[in-house]
Amino acid sequence: MTMKKYLRPFLAGTAALLLAACGNGGSSNDEIQEGSKQSGEGETVEVTYWHAMNGPHQEATTELVNQFNESQDKYKVVEQNQGDYDTLQQKIMASAAAQDGPTMAQVTASNIPDYSDAGLIQVLDEELLTGEDGFSQEQIDDIFPGFLEGSKMGDDLYAIPFSKSVRVMYLNQDILDEYEMETPTTWEDVQELGEKMQENGDDRFALGLENGFAMELETMARQNGADWVSDDLSTVDIASDEATEPMQFINDGLDAGWARTAGEDGFMSGPFGRGEVAVYLGSSAGLAHVEPVAEENGINWTTAEIPVYDDGDKLTLLAGNDLSVFSSASDEEKAGAVAFMSFLLQEEQTADWAIKTGYLPITQSGLNSDTYQSYLEENPLAVAASKEAEYAKQSPMFVGGGEYFNAMVDALDKIVVNGEDVDQVMADLEEQTISIIEENNDVTVENN
């Protein structure tokens, strides 16, 4: 069975999803300026908040903004929906020249280095973060370490984690039962399932991946002992055995026919929900997309923590967005933004946000709260992601990250679509990555 029809959309779909920045929308700059002004000495300080939440996420955002505004009378948060993430990022960059940006906004890890390099966002130093209306040290310590470290560049904190997801394993329980397999805990288990299915002439797939599986590959490499790109950017070992072995594993599965990417289906939630795939690696925030398709097709399914290697460490990478404060804001507005962030990360609010949106609680107290634990009892499909919060981490941020990601997409496309040699392509990617980091980040990088 040829896999080419499942592979061709890989490059365009991934790059468009994560890196695009185009379009206009949201509020006008005049409205933004008006919303961010302080009314006068002793009066309420208005804090403009740009975001890209829609549907139920928009409703949950508005509810939290209203709760904060009603909880005190010193600050008033004015939310401004920019339509989508592409438009949000474009408007942030467009606001730079005119210095008419928001007080705070949703940002992604891939954007933070460029915003920082352009001087757009504020370092959240101790004075600002723990000011009169900001975070207590206890509250900062309550944030999951991997979440907080993922918002740093070097020792500087540029954002507060907010809407975070992890990769989880979606499982077709009927297929596992049919082949008398337990829930896979290792990648070797997944391969064993695939080989059993092929021996039985089963044309379904053991493993399903999104068209963009760069995050899964990096996760597997890090589990296998690779630094990939080290947190301090001093080491890149993308061409090491520990990194190339997972790529070879994925490529071999695709070639053998027991693994597939979403391909023309666009997203793997469709094929999985139709019963065509036993194990699907996807975002924990994708539960709402899987559930209706699986229900429509009568699929018996569940979720579990992602597999590891036999002797590898548990690890999953974070996705989602953070909250940053913009340098152009006044000191009073910056203080108001931090006060709002502190409010969002209080136990009740972070638990409520996670329940209503499918993201993870950002703090340990939020996850362990009676509210969220009751939710998990009633919604067991969310348990796997909650367990992974303890060992989740963010890939390191660096200036030139967008260029690196494009190189990564091109490299995977060369391997899975064009059939080029894994070792050579990964070696070339390592050289490209080192060059990008050294040219943009004032560091000297060692390679494998």
Image (cartoon, rainbow, N blue to C red):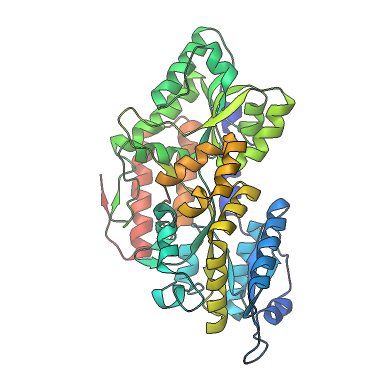
The vertical placement of 337 against 148, above or below, is below
Of all residues, the one furthest to the front in this rendering is 370
The vertical placement of 25 against 166, above or below, is below
Q: Residue at x 54, y 40 (%)?
A: 212
Residue 152, position as x, y percentages in the image: 41, 62
Residue nearest the observer in this picture, 247 or 174: 174
Q: Quarter of the image for the C terminus: give it.
A: top left
Q: How many marks?
A: 0
Residue 172, position as x, y percentages in the image: 58, 23
Asked if residue 408 shows in the view, the reply is yes
Q: Residue at x 53, y 17 (%)?
A: 176
Q: Is residue 448 left or right of residue 129?
A: left
Of all residues, the one furthest to the top in this rendering is 200
Q: Residue at x 62, y 48 (%)?
A: 355
Q: Residue at x 46, y 52 (%)?
A: 364
Residue nearest the observer in this picture, 326 or 133: 133
The vertical placement of 314 against 61, above or below, is above
Q: Quarter of the image for the N terminus: give it.
A: top right
Residue nearest the observer in this picture, 374 or 132: 374
Quarter of the view holding residue 43: bottom right
Residue 154, position as x, y percentages in the image: 35, 64
